[in-house]
Amino acid sequence: MERKSTAVAGPVLEVKNLSVSFRMYDRGLEQYDLKVISNLNLDVRPGEIVAVAGSSGSGKSLLAHAVMGLLPENASVEGEISYGGKLLEQKDMERLRGKEFALVPQSVTFLDPSMKVGPQVTGPRPSRERRQRQREVFDRFHLAEAVDRLYPFQLSGGMARRVLVSTAVLSGASLILADEPTPGMDLEMALEALQCFRELADEGRAVVLITHDIDLAFQVADRVAVFYAGTTVETAPSGDFLRGPEALRHPYSKALWNALPQNGFQPVPGFQPYAKALPKGCLYAPRCPWRTEECGGEIPMRELRGGMVRCIHAT
Ligand SMILES: Nc1ncnc2c1ncn2[C@@H]1O[C@H](COP(=O)(O)OP(=O)(O)OP(=O)(O)O)[C@@H](O)[C@H]1O
Ligand code: NI
C-alpha cells in the first residue's frame, strides 16, 4: 500500500502520563479506585497514522474516550492531553468533539437507533454538496443508495462499521480516532477503510488507529504504539514491525510479533495482570524473560534507536 508521510509539524495530539481510575463499589458499599490506565503516552502529528496495538483490556478504547471527553462519571483522569499544543479540559473536548475530533467507535451501538442512516451521516438539512460527498464516500464502501433510508438495526455488523468509517471520513475533523474500525469487514473492505485513513493522513490530518489487525495496520501506519496493562511500553516506526523482533525494543512487542499467525502463532505465556493486582515497577515483569530485581523500581519511558521504550533492559 502506498504511503507518503507528510509528518513534519509538532504533534496535533499529545497525551502525557495519562492515568485513568474508576471509583468502584465493593460489597458493603466500600469504595476503592481501580487504576486501569497509568503513565500512558502517545503523540500524533499532522499527516501521520499511529496504530495502537495491545491485547484486550490494555486501555486502547479508554484512551480514545479520554481524548473525546467521553469517560463515564465515575472516572478520574490525571496527566495531560493537549491538542495543537494547548492543554485540554473537559469543556474543550466537548466543544471539539464531532468538529475537530472524530471518533470511529468500537461499538456500533454508537449509531442513533432512531435515525435513518443517510441523515445521521450528513446531519440535518445537508447542502447538495454534502449529500454528494456522502454518496461518493458511501459508494466507495459499497453502501447502496437504499442504505440511506435504513435504520441502524437493519444494517449488518460490517455495514454498520462502514457507515461509522464514512462518518469520520466526511467529518472534516483534523484528528480521527478509529477504535477497531475493521472487524466484520471482508479483507477488501478492511483494506479500503485503511486506505481511506491513509488518504486522510496524507491530506494532513492525524489518525490514531486502534486495531487488532496489526499486520494490516503496519502497512498503512507510520508508527505503532504498543499498550500493555494500561501503559505504553513501546512506540516504534512501523517499519520495525515489518522487519521483525530484532528491530523491536520491548520484550512484549517482540512477543506480540511472534504471536502473529504468519510468524508461527507462538502465544505469550501467562496473562496480562488485572488492574486490581498490578505488579510494582514494570507491569510486564511477571512474564518477562529478562526480568531482574531492578524491574521492581520505577521504569521511565526512554528513547532508543529512533523509538521509545519502557524497559531498562532493552538495547
Ligand atoms: N467504566 C468502567 N469501569 C471500570 N473499569 C472499566 C470501565 N471501562 C473500562 N474498564 C476497564 O479498563 C480496562 C481497559 O479497557 P479498554 O476498553 O480501554 O480496553 P481495550 O484495550 O480497548 O480492549 P479491547 O481490545 O477488548 O477493546 C479494562 O480492564 C476494562 O475492564
Ligand atoms: Ni477497545
Image (tube, rainbow, N blue to C red):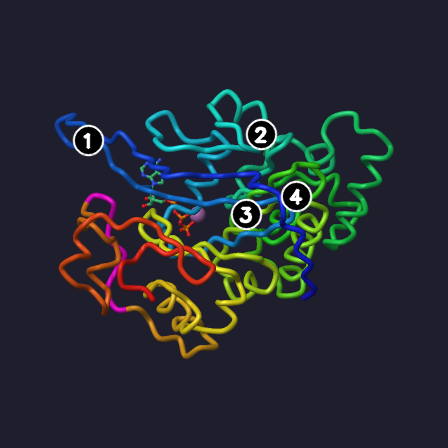
Residue 132 has which mark? none
Q: In what quadrant of the picture does the N terminus appear?
A: bottom right
User: Which sits earlier in the primary sequence, circle 3 or circle 2?
Assistant: 2
How busy is the neighbourhood of tag 1: few (under 14 within 10 Å), some, or many (20 plus)? few
Residue type marked 2: Arg
- Return the residue at label 1: 32
User: Which sits earlier in the primary sequence, circle 4 or circle 1?
Assistant: 1
The furthest residue to the top: 91
Distance from label 3 to label 2 (Cα)? 15 Å
Instruction: Identify the main secondary structure in magenta.
Output: loop
- Return the residue at label 4: 205
Q: Nearer the viewer, mark 1 or mark 3?
A: 3
Closer to the camera, 263 or 202?
Answer: 202
Distance from label 2 to label 1 (Cα)? 30 Å
Residue for point 17% across, 57% down = 294
User: Which sits earlier in the primary sequence, circle 2 or circle 4?
Assistant: 2
User: Which sits earlier in the primary sequence, circle 2 or circle 1?
Assistant: 1
Distance from label 4 to label 1 (Cα)? 40 Å
Span highlighted in magenta in the image: 269-276
Q: Secondary structure at mark 1?
A: strand
Residue type marked 3: Val
In the image, is residue 85 above or below residue 3?
above
Q: Secondary structure at mark 4?
A: loop
Residue for point 60% across, 39% down = 175
Q: Secondary structure at mark 2?
A: loop
